[in-house]
Image (cartoon, rainbow, N blue to C red):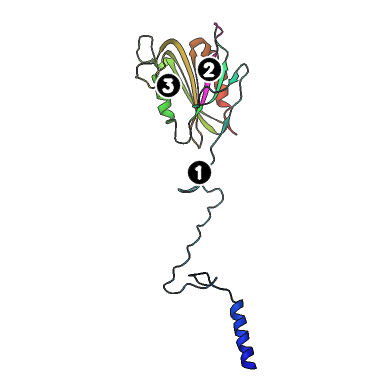
Amino acid sequence: DAGDDASKIVDLLRKDAPQPAAGGLPAGHPPIDGASPAPAAAPALPEGHPPIEGAAPSKLVELEFDLPEGWTERPPSNMMRRAQYELPGGDDGSPVELVVYYFGPGEGGSVQANLDRWKGQFTTADGKPLPAEAIREEAFESNGLKMRLLEVHGTFNSAMMPGVGGGAQTAEQRMIAGIVETPSGPWFIKAVGPDAAIAAQREQITAFLKSARVK
């Protein structure tokens, strides 16, 4: 009869109605007193916005360099070296070496700390601090990157830190070293060897440093 038909219609409507999730309100239902509001979704950062704390870190910067004529790339001799090159040597024919280092974001020390450490590895022949004319420093920018260049000559102490004993001391040595600043930390290049041999590579080492660019 009509009453049974009405009951069947109500039952069908109940079956077709969306069911609320266990313990929650139906989809689209406004919150009621005492109910916990759903957590708001974190807003997306605008395009090009720098990452904020807790966000995924930015991609590491990789550099590439132009290899000067006469240089030979060699496999790095240890994990601290990013690249290693054999350069033409001096009058005795023995080659000298240039090494590229990169230690990762926040590693390797500051630019100035490294410049000071490198200068501190050299003294005069009688162990005194070097005169100003034995040190040359430059700061410049190339390919959108800030760079520093250091050239120093004298007696070289191979100890890791200046003022620390135990390292071999070698007279008439020269170092030409450079630092490339990147968003993910500094890259370092360094060549140390006989004074005349390194001096003969000054132009090539400087060009190598200035060629550094982001891949």
State yes or no: residue 76 in magenta: no
Measured from the top left, where is residue 114 in percent x and y? Answer: 42, 26
User: Is residue 184 placed above or below 163 in the rendered structure?
Assistant: below
Magenta residues (range): 91-100
In the figure, residue 18 lies in which quadrant?
bottom right
Measured from the top left, where is residue 53 in percent x and y? Answer: 45, 48
State yes or no: residue 98 in magenta: yes
The three-letter code of the residue at mark 1 reads Pro
Which quadrant does the N terminus fall into?
bottom right
Residue tagged 2: 97
Measured from the top left, where is residue 147 in percent x and y? Answer: 50, 29
Residue 118's tag is 3
At 53% from the left and 55% from the top, the residue drawn is 44
- Would you say 1 lies left or right of 192 here? right
The three-letter code of the residue at mark 2 reads Glu
> The residue tagged with tag 1: helix, strand or loop?
loop
The numbered mark, 3 or 1, whose residue comes first in the sequence reads: 1
